Structure formats: structure tokens, C-alpha cells
């Protein structure tokens, strides 16, 4: 049986604070799983509580043992760089405010001013990310 090692008072306090206060459910889940494991809960029991695969719980425990608190958090994922700079994004918002019923207007203005071709989906995604749409 795999269990998390016995936790120190500081580790328990830190994990409990993470469970209570972190904004993302996945990190609260992982922290609580480490606490449960240290209290003798089996991996299968923890997996059933959180409705995840037992291998996920096992990885959480391994990452906790190897990296400590940092091991509970996801690594930064790479992705495609944005097509628009911060300045261009701000300009896109201004164009939408000028003509709120036409995303195509914004696309045309961005291409005209910056020579960058972006799709209407790109502009909508940008606005959604910025809660401006």
C-alpha cells in the first residue's frame, strides 16, 4: 500500500490552508488527498471520494513526496503565442467599441493598421478572455 509520509504540523497547516483558500478545485482536491493519504486512507478510497482514477491519486502522492507543495500544481503548459501584442489587443477592444455589432470591422481595421490577418474567432476569443464581449 502506498501512503503519503507522515506530515509535519507545518505541512498539515499549509495543506489545510490550500484546501480552504485556493481558488481552483483541482489544487484543493490534491492537497486534501495528501492529507487523507497521510491519515491512512487507501488510494482507491481517495480515488472514489474524488471520482478520479487511482493512478491520478498515485501521481499526486509521488509528486508530493518528490517536490513537496510545488508538486501539487500543474506545470506551465506551452501554447501558441498570441498573434496580437498587448497594444494591438487594446486597439481591437477600441475597434469593437466603435462598431460593437461587427467583429469583421475589427478584423479589417487590425489588418489595415498592423498588417496582421486574424480571424473573427481570434477576436471573439480575445474579447471573451478580457471579459469585454
Image (cartoon, rainbow, N blue to C red):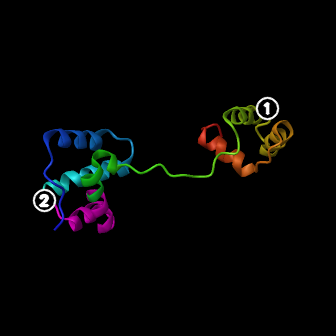
Q: Which mark is residue 55?
A: none
Q: In the rendered view, does 111 fall on the left or right side of 84?
A: right
Magenta stretch: residue 46 in it? yes
Q: Which mark is residue 40?
A: 2
Q: What is the number of callouts on the image? A: 2
Which residue is located at x 16 percent, y 61 percent? 41
The quadrant of the picture occupied by the C terminus is: top right
Given this view, does label 2 or label 1 mark the residue nearer the observer? 2
The quadrant of the picture occupied by the N terminus is: bottom left
Q: Is residue 67 above or below residue 13?
A: below
Residue where numbered disc 1 is placed = 98
Q: Give the structural element (helix, strand or loop) at label 2.
A: loop
Residue 127 drawn at (x, y percent): 66, 41
Q: Is residue 90 above or below residue 43?
A: above
Give the Cα distance between marks 2 and 1.
61 Å
Magenta stretch: residue 73 in it? no
Q: Give the structural element (helix, strand or loop) at label 1.
A: helix
Along the line of sight, the residue nearer the viewer: 47 or 4:
4
The quadrant holding residue 39 is bottom left
Which segment did they paint magenta? 41-61
Which residue is located at x 29 percent, y 62 percent? 57
Residue 102 drawn at (x, y percent): 80, 43
Amino acid at each position: 500500500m502506498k501512503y503519503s509520509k507522515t506530515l509535519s504540523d507545518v505541512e498539515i497547516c499549509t495543506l489545510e490552508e490550500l484546501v480552504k483558500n485556493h481558488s481552483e478545485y483541482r489544487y484543493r482536491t490534491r492537497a486534501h488527498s495528501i492529507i487523507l493519504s497521510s491519515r491512512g486512507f487507501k488510494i482507491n478510497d481517495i480515488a472514489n471520494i474524488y471520482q478520479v482514477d487511482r493512478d491520478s491519486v498515485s501521481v499526486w502522492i509521488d509528486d508530493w513526496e518528490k517536490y513537496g507543495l510545488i508538486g501539487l500544481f500543474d506545470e506551465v503548459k506551452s501554447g501558441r503565442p498570441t498573434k496580437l501584442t498587448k497594444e494591438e489587443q487594446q486597439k481591437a477592444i477600441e475597434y469593437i467599441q466603435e462598431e460593437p455589432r461587427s467583429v469583421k470591422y475589427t478584423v479589417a481595421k487590425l489588418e489595415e493598421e498592423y498588417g496582421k490577418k486574424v480571424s473573427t474567432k481570434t477576436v471573439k476569443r480575445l474579447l471573451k478572455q478580457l471579459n469585454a464581449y
